[in-house]
């Protein structure tokens, strides 16, 4: 496989062998109330596939405004689950969308985004089960 | 007679509006406020500002509004325009503006002209919102509040 990524790529460094979600802040925010934490995790599981779909559709249409808006919105969603690895990726996608430039770079970033999101969904699904 | 301890904010019949088009974020924020201010009478979420304007008769003490409100509803009016309308109709409403927009110059107009508190959407946002709500609810007659950053 061709590897054009820089050595310090956080997604590669993480290798997705460790958790991408950090629920510490969420647990603190909700004073550890399990039913509230579970409600928010379920909201994340509901919303993130829709947001990924929006972003992927915008990319396939090279709709820069759509890319910008979807990336911007997703930054809020992933911040709740403490997925800090995605913030620089989404920020770059948002900036490229704003500048309406470099669709190839956006595609590369979106591949990382999709990998991390799938991993995050698995982690949160597992976490929700443990809250039952 | 108010028998509440001095350090307890006055939350009697207080209404808080959240104007935010990101569902996970708005639900989290609502649950966070409910958790930390359990006596707040009502917290309502509006995905677009126009809906919030229509409900201003409820006299919200605080409106927490995202600066960008057209991520999911492309026809939605932006946050600044909504802030202008709120201040025109209910000038004493305390407004907290949230945004992950790093360009503070864009946000500064709303802070300067409309006496809002700006809180960046980052890891410390919820705690800053908590401090801001405590400050606003603790000063019953306050019409403004110092920005937190």
Image (cartoon, coloured by chain):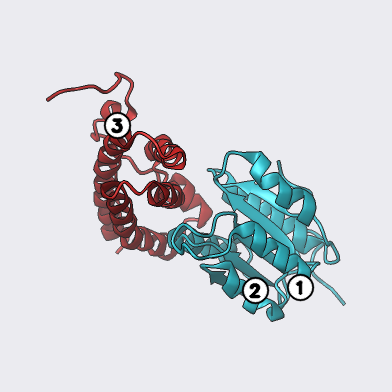
Chain colours: A red, B cyan
Q: Label 1 is found on which chain of the structure?
A: B
Discs 2/3, front: 2
Quarter holding the N terminus of chain A? top left
Q: Tell me whether circle 3 and circle 1 mark residues in contact (CB < 8 Å).
A: no
Q: Residue at x 39, y 42 (%)?
A: A83
Question: Is residue B41 shown to the viewer in this render?
Answer: no
Which residue is identified by label 3?
A11
- Does the CB distance between marks 2 and 3 fall below 8 Å? no
Most foreground residue, A46 or B124: A46
Q: Nearer the viewer, residue A28 or B22?
A: B22
Q: Chain of mark 3?
A: A
Residue under label 1: B89
**Residue A60, x across and y down, in percent:** 25, 48
Callout 1: helix, strand or loop? helix
Residue A77, compared with residue B83, is above or below; it is above
Residue B88 in view (yes/no):
yes
Q: Residue at x 72, y 58 (%)?
A: B134
Q: Looking at the rendered structure, which numbered label has been put on residue B53?
A: 2
Tell me: residue B18, above or below residue B145: below
């Amino acid at each position: 496989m061709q590897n054009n990524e820089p050595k310090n790529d956080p997604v590669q460094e993480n290798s997705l062998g460790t958790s991408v979600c950090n629920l510490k802040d969420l647990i603190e925010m909700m004073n550890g109330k399990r039913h509230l934490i579970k409600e928010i995790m379920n909201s994340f599981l509901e919303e993130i596939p829709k947001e990924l779909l929006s972003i992927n559709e915008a990319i396939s249409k090279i709709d820069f405004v759509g890319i910008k808006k979807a990336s911007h919105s997703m930054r809020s969603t992933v911040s709740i689950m403490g997925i800090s690895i995605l913030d620089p990726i989404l920020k770059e996608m948002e900036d490229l969308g704003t500048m309406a430039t470099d669709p190839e770079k956006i595609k590369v970033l979106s591949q990382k985004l999709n990998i991390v999101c799938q991993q995050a969904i698995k982690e949160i699904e597992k976490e929700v089960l443990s809250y039952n | 007679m108010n028998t509440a301890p001095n350090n307890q904010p006055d939350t009697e019949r207080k209404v808080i509006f959240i104007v935010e088009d990101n569902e996970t974020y708005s639900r989290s924020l609502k649950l966070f406020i409910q958790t930390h201010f359990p006596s707040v009478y009502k917290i309502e979420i509006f995905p677009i500002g126009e809906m919030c304007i229509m409900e201003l008769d409820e006299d919200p003490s605080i409106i927490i509004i995202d600066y960008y409100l057209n991520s999911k509803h492309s026809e939605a009016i932006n946050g600044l325009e909504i802030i202008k309308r709120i201040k025109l109709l209910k000038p004493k409403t305390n407004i907290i503006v949230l945004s992950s927009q790093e360009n503070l110059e864009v946000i500064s107009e709303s802070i300067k002209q409309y006496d809002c508190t700006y809180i960046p959407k980052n890891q410390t946002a919820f705690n800053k919102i908590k401090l801001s709500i405590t400050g606003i609810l603790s000063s019953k007659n306050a019409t403004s509040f110092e920005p937190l950053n």
